[in-house]
Each structure stands twice: as structure tokens, then as C-alpha cells.
Image: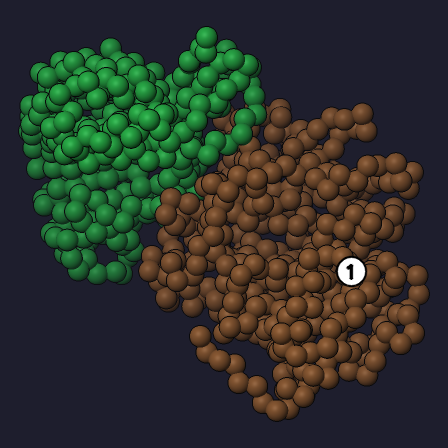
Amino acid sequence: MTATVTSPLVSDCIRALDVVVIGSPSGERVERFQGALARLGAPPARIVSYLDLLDGGPPPGLLRPGTLLRLESPDRDLELLRAFLALGVDLEDEEGEYARMTRKELEEAPLDPHRILCPRQWFLGYREALRRISRSFGEQARWMIPPGAVLEMSDKPLCHGLLRRYGIPVPRGLGVVRSYEELRERMRQTDTPRVFVKLAHGSSASGVVAYQTNGRSHRAVTTTEVARTPLGVSLYNTKRLRACREEREIATLIDELCRHRAHVEAWYPKAGFRCRTFDLRVLVIAGEARHVVVRTSRSPITNLHLADDRTVGRATLEELLPSWGQAAWEAARAGCERAMAVWPDALYAGFDLMVSSDRKGHALAEVNAFGDLLYGALHRGQDPYEAEVRAAVEREAAV
Amino acid sequence: MILTRIQAVFSESGHGSSTRSTQTLQVRRGSMAIYDHITEFMGQRVQDWEPGDPVADPEGTAYRLSVDWDEAEEGVEWTAKFAAFLDDPSSREVTGLVVGPWGQVATGEASSGPVVEAIAAARDRLPRLRSLFLGDITSEEAEISWIVQSDVSPTLAAYPELEHFGVRGGNSLAFGTVRHDRLRTLIIESGGLPREVVTAVLSAHLPELRHLELWLGDGEYGGDADVTDLQPLLSGEQFLRLEHLGLRDSEFSDEIAAALARSPLLDRLRVLDLSLGTLSDAGAQALLDCPAVRRLRKLDLHHHYCSEAMVARLEALPVEVNASDPQEPDEDDGDSYRYVAVSE
């Protein structure tokens, strides 16, 4: 492990660091971030909830000269979930009509963390929140990741299109579809028998369906379920992986996903490792790929949160390299770093990297603005948060 | 009393209406998909070959030719890539060939027919071919039961010196009448092997066969053979040189075990592989009660439904035993279900 040598200038900057985290004050991420600051010898960050910033500018005194702003994932904070949905109730959607909950339905809805509630409406609300925050903080605000970049990464169709335009390898896109029928037609037109259908604004494996058909047989693998309750039809993230072969049920699920905006990509055949599929989460910080976590699965979908840990697992890059090859890894790493350059003002991002079935190629599945919650991952002796903070300070010191 | 029935996880056949209610069921922990390309086949290292690559080690390396999705979209054909391979003078020395995806194998339209035809037609260009694996396709490329095979017997007929033949995919697979004086290894991997194929193979004239491996699979995916179809094999009258027998991924592993225990076939085997199937204590007991089992070198039973106590007894045999990956039957409404590992 290489010891990180800190110049006196950087040490001083760390001790004088002032970080404000905008997120969910009670969340695990904030706690871990504070731990990292403490280990670095930096003062604790000041934590502000998104909720406190929605109605006007930053509270007086929040921003000091040199304050570094960190946007954190609203994650599973149900109060924030409700707030963004509420903000999104009446907002215009330039992409068309997607499912909405009324204010009344929102108030009455029991907030089950497994229920997927109008993700497009949530995104409209979150986007509005970030726009207000960004405007009110002004041009001089120093963001670890600018709000605009966060929004682009959180919009799968937009992000996919951006990466493609910049020449970053991504699976072939089939665009946004509005129904199962349209999906089948698009698959026919493009000669694509196997696809991944994803919610445009879902987190990781939320609302992902690996679907294939040869015209006669159908198969959909997913952790997402449609349930009919007295409240109506709802989507749920379950912790169980299911395979469905009945077309009507698959159509119902996909129609429901489409109501919330669904983005479709060709199923990118991935390489295997020890009888499992895998992908890599690569955290790029200050233009350099740092922390790497290998996620394995006994199904086509990686990055799952399941109750059953025999289906998903972890491996290390070192274990993977002998069969993958150093050259192929370096090409993939460079690919992630090039993708990071699509957002030159963003200090870091998490990239979901897939390796092609012949192990020679790679493609990006997703970009994650909050992709740095990586348990146990160390790079040069630092966890992701330590590395980000140091990089932020070094970036400032270099200016 | 618990009714023990062997059933498919997925109850729709895709060929019309089902006799059982269609259900969405949990992906079982024990279900297995093939995610790795083979790295070794019959003692040879497998290596991808693309036009422009040298054929540097025809003795020790089996060359894999594939046409993946993107290439197929650009109009690349497997037969054209194969022709380019044959144009390299060094390919005359090649002893091992692996066929990976031959185009858009997931669409249900890309049959292996043209591949089989091309390989058969190349008999004079590959005079030293000894090993052939047809269908090194992972689940990420196509589900095993969605691979469209064809009548593969022309390849056997065209290469009388062939020693090792493997094929993956039971859908549309046929063998015709098989006579081959030199074949030592025959491996058929599938999620459901049709009875006709089982019958054709077990009545084939293969006097030199040392290694036979059949993945019998799931009735819902075409695996409609039963233990009576194995009779020509179990009688002991076939394949007098057989040393390694795999009757894998079977819905009737217990019955196979019981029949084998009564069969003279066991006397000549060194390796018995009943893995990936539904073996329970009943079948395991039959094996334990059979003296010939003790003379095996290796007994592979991984992915099974035996109790811990039974596993302990199996592992106490003076034989190399693999009894890993134990499964729990699914209990539903008083019924108990055991599943094969590879079906779809």
C-alpha cells in the first residue's frame, strides 16, 4: 500500500476545510463522510437537508469563503421522497405525460420503502429542487459535483445519449418506449431479441427487467413486481429475483414501467467469472480511476440488493485480472476516465462497467453521481470519501 | 405424506397452452446458467481466433471461431470467418476447433445448420481435426434451450478420425444414425435433451467411446426421455470401452442411480457423474448398496437433494466424491419439488 504523502500546503488546506453536505442528515452516507473528514484531520462538515433549501436561498451564514459543497443522495429518506414528489406534482414535463400522484394521494399514501412511487414525478421534483438550489447559491459556489452534472447522470436516456455522442462505448440504445407493444415493435425493427428495460430515473437495480423473446418464448428476469392493491396498481422492488415466462404478465410489468418513463438498451452479453456474471463499479476521482468493486451474480442482472446472498457476491479486481487481462482492464479503465471527462467540472462519479463476453471489449451501463458508497473499498489506503476530499483540496491548491 | 414430484420451475413450454397454471417463480439459488466460455477442451487450451491472428499452436490449442451480435449486425457470417481461417495454410495442422456463437443466436432463427455444413465440407482442409465443440455459447449470449441446433451427424461422418465431440443445445438437435469407429468422447449439454437424440446416441455404433456425457434436462424444455430410454446403455451391451459416464441434469436421477446399481455397466466405469440433477437419499442409498460403486475412481453428485447424513456416508466411500451444492426441495402446498440445475 503506497503511503500518501501530504504536502504542508495540502495539510493546511485540509485543516481549514469547510464542507457543507446537502442531503439527508440522518443517513449512513453522511455519517461515513464525517468519519472520513475526521480521519483526515478536517473539521466536521455542516449538514443541511434539501428541505431547508427549497424555499429561498441558503440560510444566512451557510456559505463562507471557500465552502465546498457536496450533494449527497437523498437515498431512502422518506421525508425527502415525499418532498420531491410534492414538488413535482404540478411541474410541466417536456418529455410528455407520465404517471403522477396528486397532492392528496401523496398525503394519504403509506410510504413503503419498497414501493416505487412515480419516479418521473420524483425526478421532476428533484430537478426543480437542484435548480433552485443552484440558482440561489450562485455562480461562485464550489460544488464537488455541480447540480447540472448530477441531473444529467440521474437521467438514463440523457446520460446514455451523452456518452454515445462522446464516443464512450455503451450498449445500443432502443430509446424510450411508452408501452410493451411499442417495445416489441422497436425490438423487431432493430432486430434485438434481448433487452434491458430500465426506469429512466431509478437507482441501480430498481425497476430493471432483463427481457428476451424469440417470438414464441418469452423470459423476463427482474426484482421488480407489479401489485394490485386497494390503492391501485403499484410497482415494488422486492429482494427476490424472479423469472417470468408468461407474456401477459411481462407485458403488464413493462407497461407499468413505461408509465414512469422507461429506457431500453440492447442486452449487452457480459463475460463470466467463476460461473457468474459480473460488472465493476469504478470510482473515478479527479480524472483517475481509483476504487474498483467487482459485483458478481448468478443472473443476468448485477448490482442487486437481495435477501439471498448466494445469488450475488463480490470479487476483487486482482481475482479477475488473470482471466480478463491487464491490457483489457487498462482499456476499460481509460474508457471510464474518458467518460468522466464528459463532466469536466465534476470531481468524481461512479461508473458501472461491463466486460464483453469475449473479454476484449467493455461498455458503460450507468453513471452514478452518488456511486461512492462502497463498503470496504480502499485505494492507496483511503476510502472513497477520503480520496474525494483530498482530491478536492488538491484541486483547489493547484488553482 | 409428502408427494414428491419432479417439476420444472417454469411451467410454460412456449409452444402453446400449458397444462399447468403459469406462475412467476423465484429464480432458484440452485439454478445454473453457463456464463463462462470454455477455456479448455479435451486437454487443449481454447483460444479465440480472428482474421489476421496467427494459427501458432495447432497441436496444443483449440481455436474458437465466433460471430457475436455486433459482427452479425454488420453482416459478418460464421461461414465466411471459417473460410478465412481455412485460408491460413497453418490451419491444415489444426487439431481442435470450438464453435462459439454463430451469429444472432438468441433470435431463434440462427440454426447451426450452415455451420455444420461448412465444417463437414472442410474435411480435406482439416485433415488433423481431432476435437470439435459445437456451441460454446454463454447464457448472456443465448439461453441454452433457445440455441437452435441441427442435425450434427454430417460432422461425424466427414471426420472419421475425430476423437472428441461436444455440442451444446438440445433444441432441434438431431444425430441421425451414428457410426463412428474412432470417437472416444461424446458430450451433449442441454436444458432438455429430446428422447430421439438419447435413443440415437445410445444405439449408435461407437466402439471406441470412453467418455459419454448427456445432460438430460427438463421436460418443459424438451427433455422427454425417461429411464427406460437408457436401457440400451444400462444393459451393458453398448460401449464396451466406456470409462466415464455422465447422466447429468436429470429429473429422474434416483431412478438412474437405482438402474445403474443393477447394471453390469458400473463394473467398467472409472468415473460416474450424476451431478446437476435431482438425486435424493433414495438414489444415493442405491449407490451405497452397490459394491461396484466402491471401485470407481470418482463419483460426482454435485447439485443434489441428499440429506447431510447421506452426504457424510457418500463421502466416507473409498472414492473421490463431490457432493457439494446441496439443494432444498421447494415445498408448496404439501407437495415437494426437486429441480434440475440447467433447464432454460
Q: Which chain is green?
A: B
In percent of the image, x 65 and y 41: which residue is there?
A207
**Vertical order, B71 against B308 (above or below):** below
Q: Is residue B169 left or right of residue A331?
A: left
Q: Circle 1: is it few (<14), some (14-19), or many (20+) Cα within 10 Å? A: some
In percent of the image, x 86 and y 69: which residue is there?
A135
Q: Amino acid at mark 1?
A: Pro
Q: How many marks?
A: 1
Any part of residue B336 in sight: yes
Q: Which residue is mark 1?
A: A25
- Quadrant of res B250: top left
Percent x, y for residue B279? Answer: 32, 22
Front-lying residue, B147 or B117? B147
Percent x, y for residue A378? Answer: 52, 67
Which quarter of the rendered picture does the C terminus of chain B lie within? top left
Front-lying residue, A100 or B121? A100
Q: Which chain is brown?
A: A
**Vertical order, B300 against A47 (above or below):** above
**Vertical order, A264 against A382 (above or below):** above
